[in-house]
Image (cartoon, rainbow, N blue to C red):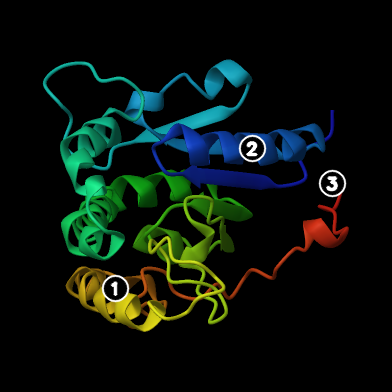
Amino acid sequence: MSEPAATIVFFPEGAFGPTNNCVGIGDVLRRRGHRVVFIVEESFAGTLGAQGFEERTMRLNPPPETEEAPGQFWKDFIRETAPVFRRPTIDQLSEFIAPTFQALIDGSKYVDARLTEILGELEPDLVVEDNVVTFPALFAGGAPWARIDSCNPLEIKDPDLPPVFSGLPSEDRSGWGEFWEAYRAAPRRDARRLRPVLPRARRPSPPRRRFHPRQPDAEPLPLSAGGRLPAA
């Protein structure tokens, strides 16, 4: 049996949506002969293994005193913040979006040592992450990386599309400016918290008010226009 063509690591956020998205892509790559490894939160341990994938586990926050279900942190977080969703989306920026980004950044910093250890062990040819904020350990490892944005595609900014999280219509731009101003104010302080961690990774910090550096190793793959992943 020949050696796998490449080691590809998937690092989805600890929720079923991004995880299942990566599983579909990973399955295609695995059937083409690549070694596919998933980095998952401890609460997901065994979930990907049951589907035949290799797993490496980590935590984004201190372990709880009792056993937790897969994705339990975010289940609890959404339940506690659910009343905010009854308010206009512009109010949700400070009452939900900013606290969410703060929790994500705290997790990125907490997992840094473990993530560095995992990537050092695997020495991947490519890391594919599906996360909202960046992880400095990805850059320190030196492997090429690409980001999937399955949570909210509007996080990839486009001047011809409504502001992310706004729910505003594309055909009426009258509320776009006000929402963008509120958006820029809400997460600004959180984005700055990642900057001191990134220099050790020898990669540039994210642009102002962004939570990911630009991807130097990735080019758009227009699958909708007939593009195809290369075979192993």
Q: Quadrant of residue 45?
A: top left
Residue 116 x %, y %: 37, 52
Q: Is residue 17 left or right of residue 114?
A: right
Upstream in the sequence, badge 2 or badge 1? 2
- Residue 186 sits above or below residue 70 on the image: below
Element type at marker 2?
A: strand
Residue beneath the point at 54% across and 21% down: 49
Residue beneath the point at 85% across and 54% down: 228
Q: Give, as a three-letter code, the residue at label 3.
A: Ala
Of labels 3 and 1, the one closer to you: 1
Residue 207, visible in the rendered structure: no
The quarter of the picture where the N terminus appears is top right
Q: Quadrant of residue 98?
A: bottom left
Residue beneath disc 3: 232
Query: How many C-alpha atoms fall within 10 Å of the one at disc 1: few (<14), some, or many (≥20)?
Result: many
Residue beneath disc 1: 183
Cβ atoms at labels 2 and 3 below 8 Å apart: no
Q: Give, as a three-letter code, the residue at label 2.
A: Val
Query: How many C-alpha atoms fall within 10 Å of the one at disc 2: few (<14), some, or many (≥20)?
Result: many
Element type at marker 3?
A: loop
The residue lying toward the viewer, choosing from 159 and 117, is: 159
Residue 145 x %, y %: 56, 61
Residue beneath disc 2: 36
Upstream in the sequence, badge 3 or badge 1? 1
Q: CA distance from mark 2 to mark 1?
A: 37 Å
- Residue 79 sits above or below residue 92 on the image: above
